[in-house]
Image (cartoon, helix red, strand yellow):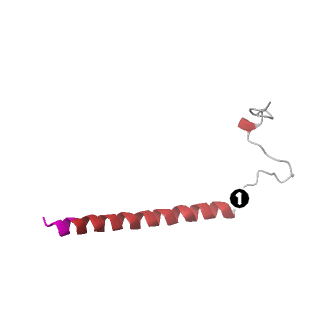
Amino acid sequence: MNKNTIITIVLVVLVIVAVVQAFQLSGMKSKVTGAASSPTTGVSSSGASSVPSNIQNLPQMVGGC
């Protein structure tokens, strides 16, 4: 094969990979934007903070004096 043909094929493959990654990135961005538009604040309807059970018994100071 000619050197220019190989370079052209590699360049086309790289452009295709870049386009696919751009579509994947825009999909992830829309998912993040959708999640950010409806945040979960951790506050229940009664006004009390709802903390997950696995972090309720954490020490007050971690690594403190």
Residue bearing mark 1: 39
For the residue labelled by badge 1, is the local secondary structure a helix, a strand or a loop? loop
Task: Please give left or right for residue 47 compared with residue 22 in the image.
Answer: right
Image-quadrant location for residue 16: bottom left
Q: Which residue is at 51% across, 66% downward? A: 26
Task: Please give left or right for residue 13 compared with residue 35 in the image.
Answer: left
**Image x and y of residue 53, in percent:** 74, 37
**Image x and y of residue 8, in percent:** 24, 69
* Residue nearer the viewer, 17 or 1: 1
Q: Which residue is at 76% across, 50% downward? A: 42
How would you classify the magenta stretch by its main secondary structure? helix
* Residue nearer the viewer, 44 or 26: 26
The span picked out in magenta is 1-6
Of all residues, the one furthest to the top in this rendering is 65
**Image x and y of residue 60, in percent:** 81, 35
Residue 49 covered by magenta stretch: no
Residue 5 covered by magenta stretch: yes
Q: Which residue is at 29% across, 68% downward? A: 12
| Amino acid type, residue under disc 1 in the picture | Pro
